[in-house]
């Protein structure tokens, strides 16, 4: 009798397991490249319990507050199914003024996560990258980069000035370092972002920052906005914020942080300082946008992730 009951119980458990394993009818699962099908991948080993998590079939991200070495940071880990379509750029009014990042992000109702991006030129910061033609007033309140593309439109193409920055192509966000402009445009980018030609921090694990002591901005402690690519579909944002006695971090600290914790294809310093911003919709795409990093400066453009 006991043996018969045990067999019956085992059969019921097997039936229950089969029912639980059955996939209910509905939309097919996203077609995700094999190397990025798992979120988060092993490269995202660093982590605490996230205080913001967003998850859908096309976009997943988490935001963590961390303090490595008493440096106050927000660490955002992102998986995006179709980066070419879902990563977007919004620019403030060309040659008129900088703009509040929240206002820029609201121009894209489908945006759920955004950060400040390109550098810019103003009367207060008139320095132009080496090789730019003309004078700084020709570029006030415009994004940097010898090539500037927004939503597929080529806004600037400076002949003979190499491009150093980021471009969004069908392969996701791609890093260029001193590339010929025509090679960049041949990849048909829909967006570009650029700051200083020396803003690449790491490429395939290699340190590419200028030697310590040769670039003052890299050595000083400032709020930072940094983006890293793990692969086509996975990206990391690091916002170094000021909090209590923390004044920020040097780019050499950022380099060491990524070397110790992540395996990224590249790490790039976006415009930071008082421009640093992190805005997202916590939980769902219907949730109101909320600022988590905001230092009060109007910005030139944003890099955002959408549904």
Image (cartoon, helix red, strand yellow):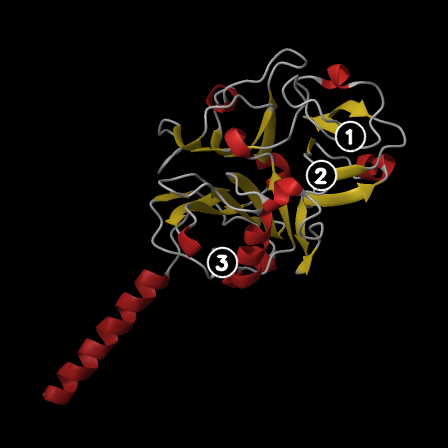
Asked whether disc 1 touches disc 2, contact meaning CB atoms under 8 Å apart, the reply is: yes
Which x, y percent locates residue 164? Answer: 75, 39
Q: Residue at x 18, y 77 (%)?
A: 9
**Residue 58 in sight here:** no
Of callouts 1 and 3, the N-terminal one = 3
Residue 165: numbered disc: 2
Residue identifier under label 1: 147
Residue 114: numbered disc: none
Q: On the rendered structure, is 264 left or right of 107? A: right
**Tag 2, which secondary structure?**
strand
- Crowd around label 3: few <14 · some 14–19 · many ≥20 (10 Å): some
Q: CA distance from mark 1 to mark 3?
A: 32 Å
Residue 44: numbered disc: 3
Q: Is residue 202 above or below residue 275?
A: below
Q: Residue at x 71, y 47 (%)?
A: 214
Which x, y percent locates residue 209? Answer: 69, 50
Q: On the rendered structure, is 216 left or right of 24? A: right
Asked whether disc 2 touches disc 3, contact meaning CB atoms under 8 Å apart, the reply is: no
């Amino acid at each position: 009798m006991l043996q018969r009951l045990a067999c019956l119980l085992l059969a019921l458990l097997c039936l229950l397991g089969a029912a639980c394993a059955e996939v209910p009818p509905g939309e097919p699962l996203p077609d995700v490249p094999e190397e990025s099908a798992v979120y988060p991948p092993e490269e995202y080993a660093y982590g605490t319990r996230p205080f913001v998590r967003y998850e859908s079939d096309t976009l997943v991200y988490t935001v963590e507050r961390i303090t490595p070495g008493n440096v106050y940071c927000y660490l955002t880990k992102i998986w995006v199914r179709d980066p070419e379509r879902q990563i977007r750029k919004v620019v403030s009014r060309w040659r008129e003024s900088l703009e509040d990042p929240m206002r820029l992000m609201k121009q894209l109702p489908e945006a759920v996560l955004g950060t400040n991006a390109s550098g810019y030129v103003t009367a207060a910061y008139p320095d132009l990258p080496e090789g730019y033609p003309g004078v700084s007033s020709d570029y006030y309140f415009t994004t940097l980069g010898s090539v500037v593309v927004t939503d597929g439109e080529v806004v600037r193409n400076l002949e003979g000035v190499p491009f150093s920055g980021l471009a969004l192509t069908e392969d996701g966000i791609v890093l260029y370092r001193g590339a010929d402009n025509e090679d960049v445009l041949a990849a048909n980018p829909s967006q570009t972002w650029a700051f200083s030609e020396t803003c690449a921090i790491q490429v395939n694990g290699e340190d590419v920052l200028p030697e310590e002591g040769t670039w003052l901005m890299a050595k000083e402690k400032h709020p930072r906005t940094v983006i890293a690519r793990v692969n086509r579909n996975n990206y990391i944002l690091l916002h170094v914020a000021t909090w209590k006695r923390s004044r920020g971090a040097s780019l050499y600290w950022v380099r060491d942080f990524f070397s110790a914790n992540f395996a990224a294809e590249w790490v790039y310093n976006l415009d930071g300082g008082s421009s640093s911003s992190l805005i997202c919709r916590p939980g769902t795409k219907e949730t109101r946008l909320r600022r988590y990093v905001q230092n009060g400066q109007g910005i030139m453009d944003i890099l955002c992730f959408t549904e």
